[in-house]
Amino acid sequence: MPTQTLPLEEDGEDAPSRADHLYLALTAGKPIGGARWSLEGVDRVEVGRGAKREARRSGRTMRVDVPDPWMSSSHVVFERERGHWVAVDAGSRNGILVNGAKQERALVGISANAAGGAADEVVEAGRSFFILRTGELAAQPALDATAARGELVTLDPLLAAAFDELRRVARSHIPVLVGGPTGSGKERIAQAVHASSGRGGAFVPVNCGALPAGLVESELFGHKRGAFSGAIADQPGLVASSSGGTLFLDEIGDLPAPAQAALLRVLEEHEVRAVGAPSAVRVDLRVVAATHRDLDALVEDGAFRDDLVARLAGFEIELPPLAERRVDLGVMLSELVPPSTQLAGAAARALFAYAWPRNVRELVRALERAVALSGSGELAPAHFTEEIATARFVTVTAPAAGTDARRDELVALLEKHRGNVSKVAVDLGRVRQQVQRWLKRYNLDPERYRT
C-alpha cells in the first residue's frame, strides 16, 4: 500500500478510521474497470455469477455478483474467522486459485500498511480476480471505477485521498513534489496538475538529468546573444517559457549544485535572469518537481539543498510501484486497451503475478505489443514477452531487523512511543513528513505498535 504525505493526523484520538476492503481487481478478463467494497460490519461475502457488477448486504453477509460467464453462480466465499479472512471454494465448477495455485481454503488479507501491496493474495474465480486487504484507510462503502485518458483514478483509499487533495491544490500556486520509482507515472501527475490548474500558459517539461553539462543554467534560465561561445541568438530559457503555465522539473535530484542555487532564487523572487542579461525579468511561475531519488538522503549527503527541498515541497505525493497497485489493474486496463479486449485466464494471471520492475511504463508497452500481436483476438500469454508470460507469484518478506541502523532506530522509537509518529519525529529532530517517508521505505506500520 502506498504511503502519501497527507495532512492527516494519525496519532491518538484523531487517528483516521480503518476498514477491511474487498477489491474486484479484474472482471471476467475485460477492461471494464474494478470495484471496491468496505467490509465494515461484514463477516461473510458470497461471490458468484450475476447479471451485473454489484453488491447487496443482508445483516453481516454480503452478496457480490460478477458478470463473468466462467464463474459459477456460487463460486467463492470470504469468511471472517477469529480476526482473519479465509477464501473458501463454494463448490464451484472450476475451483478457485490463490496466487496461481488451486485451493479449497486459504488464508487471505494482509495488513495493507505493514507489508505493502506486493504481498497481496490474489484470488481467481472464473476470469475475475479479487484482493482482500485489511486495516486500510476507511472510505465510502462502495466504489465502482473506470478510467479515461488523463484521469487520476484509483480504487486504493489512501492514494484516492492524495489524488483528491492534489486536485484541490492544483488551482493554487503551491509547488508540488512528486516522488516514486521510475515509470510510476510522475509526469502524468504533473500534467493532471496543469490541466486542473486553470493556467493558460504552456506545460513545459524539463528532464534535469538530461540537460547538457555546462549549459544547465542557460537552458533553464535563458541566455543573451554572445553570452558565451555558441550563443548566436537570445533564448528565453525553459523557466521563462513556462511563465503563466506549469514548469515540470523531472528528476530534480539530478540538478547540479550551481543550478540548485539559481533555481532557489527564482522560486523565492519570482524573477529570472538570463545568462549575460543585465537585469532579471518577472515570471508567473508554477512548479511541479519529480524524482525517483530520496531527497532527504541527498540533503544528508550534502548533494542537494535543504532550503530548495522546502521550497519545492509545498504539497508532496508519493506514487507507489505498480507491484503495489494490483487492485488497480482493471482500472488501468480500462484506459489502456480497447473496450472489446478479452484476456485469456492465463494471460490475466500473468499480469497479476509479474513484478513489473519498470512499473506503469512497462505495462503500457506490454499491452501495446499484445494488442498489436493479437489483432482483434483474445490476448494470450504468447502475445506478451516470455518474462511476463511465465511470471509466477512470489512471497515478499519485509527486511530483516538489524540490517539497517535507521530502520532499527525507527522500530525502537515506534515501540517507545506506541506508534505515535509525531513523537518519533520530535525525538529524531525531523519533520513528520520525512519520518513518514522513512516508514514507507522500510514497510513499518505505526498501527502495529499502538498497543
Image (cartoon, rainbow, N blue to C red):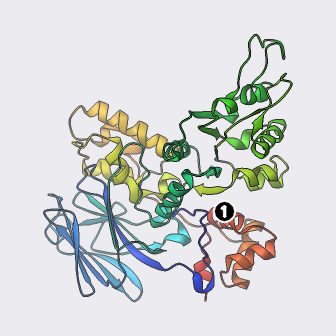
Residue 18 placement, left or right of 283: left
x then y, percent, for residue 234: 74, 16
Residue pointed to by mark 1: 437
x then y, percent, for residue 406: 76, 67
x then y, percent, for residue 305: 82, 49
Q: Amino acid at mark 1?
A: Arg
In this orientation, which residue lies closer to the viewer: 232 or 10?
232
How many numbered markers are drawn? Answer: 1
Residue 379 visible in the displayed image: yes
- Indicate the quadrant where residue 225 lies: top right
Residue 95 placement, left or right of 430: left
Residue drawn at x 42%, y 40% is 364
Residue drawn at x 69%, y 79% is 414
Residue drawn at x 74%, y 76% is 424
In this orientation, which residue lies closer to the viewer: 74 or 297?
297
Q: Answer above or below: position of 239 versus 41.
A: above
Q: Answer above or below: position of 352 versus 411.
A: above
Quarter that holds the C terminus: bottom right
User: Circle 1 sits in a helix, a strand or a loop, which is it?
Assistant: helix
Residue 227 placement, left or right of 177: right
Q: Answer above or below: position of 57 versus 440.
A: below
- Indicate the quadrant where residue 125 lies: bottom left
In this orientation, which residue lies closer to the viewer: 11 or 23?
11
x then y, percent, for residue 76: 23, 72
In this orientation, which residue lies closer to the viewer: 237 or 208?
237
Residue 357 visible in the displayed image: no
Structural crowding at the residue carrying mark 1, measured as other residues with C-alpha within 10 Å and reported as few (<14), some (14–19) or many (≥20): some
